[in-house]
Amino acid sequence: MQIAGEKDFRGYQDATVNGGLQGALLGAGISVPAYYILMRRSVTYRALPLPLKALGAVVICVPCVYISAEKAGERFSKSQYTGVGKRELDREHELERERWDKLSVVSKATDWAGRHKYGMIGAGWAASMALAFGIVARNPYQSTSQKIVQARMWAQGLTVGLLISSAMLTGFDSNSMDAPQIPHDTHDHTWKAILEQDPHLSDEERSRLREIGDAVSQRKKEKKAE
């Protein structure tokens, strides 16, 4: 492994910017056609003020830019690992894959939902907002502003329900029966695994590293017992 230099930081920044631009293109590819379709087919959408229409594009484009830029930066960071560091990442991915394969269908669903709960909440809010507005828009006795407020209230209520469901799902996942079958160490021993795989270390040095790690773990257990 090597210390990150100015070239690495510049490469990370370039990768992040390129990812953000790709996300912006994706957001524009979704929002622009949607704008023209809604303008042609929806009388209610045409009646909306311009700032509200622009807000719809922002709600689509900003998450696309942010997520795409973050993922591009993560891919660049992972691509910089070589040698022992890359082997350690591959080993962690293999362990995660084995853990996933051992889960039941229900556990896989709860695990996936637990890792993507905020995305599900955001998507659920957007879907509930669109659904509520579609239902409220049929009321001929309300103005456009009243319909928007009514749809937002319905969406907020559904979002609270999603948050409660997410909390219950997280609690169910943490207390599930499959959890004890998956050992989880709260301490990060990545540095230890990397050093043990270093080809420059002798067998005696690797053995010494393991002894030091065991001694540190034992000392922490004794402190907790006190």
Image: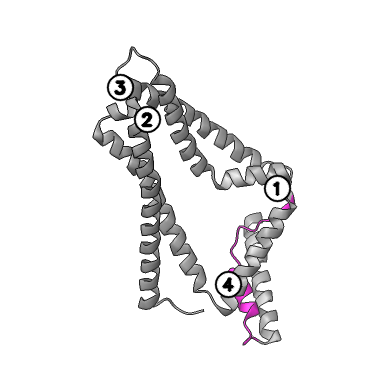
The answer to whether the residue labelled 2 contacts the one labelled 3, judged by CB atoms less than 8 Å apart, is no
Labelled disc at residue 191: 4
Three-letter residue code for mark 3: Thr
**Residue at 48% over, 39% down:** 123
In this rendering, the answer to whether 88 lies above or below 111 is: below
Q: CB of mark 1 within 8 Å of CB of mark 2?
A: no
Which residue does the numbered mark 2 point to in the structure image?
41
Spot occupied by residue 202 in the image (x, y as percentages of width and height): 67, 87
On screen, residue 146 above or below 51: above
Q: CA distance from mark 3 to mark 1?
A: 50 Å
| Residue 226 visible in the displayed image | no
Task: Check disc 1 and report its element: helix, strand or loop.
Answer: helix
Q: Is 78 on the left-hand or right-hand side of 98?
A: left
Residue plotted at (42% across, 76% down): 4
Q: Report the mark closest to the observer, 4 or 3.
A: 3
Check residue 202 in the rendering and tell me which mark sits there, or answer none.
none
Residue at 74%, 43% (x, y): give it: 177
Tell me residue 47's x, y (percent). 28, 26
Q: Is there CB contact under 8 Å for labels 2 and 4?
A: no
Circle 1 residue: 179
| Residue at which label 3 appears | 144
Q: Earlier in the sequence, mark 2 or mark 3?
A: 2
What color scheme is it?
one colour
CA separation, marks 4 and 1? Answer: 26 Å
Q: Are marks 3 and 1 in contact (CB under 8 Å)?
A: no
**Region in magenta:** 181-201
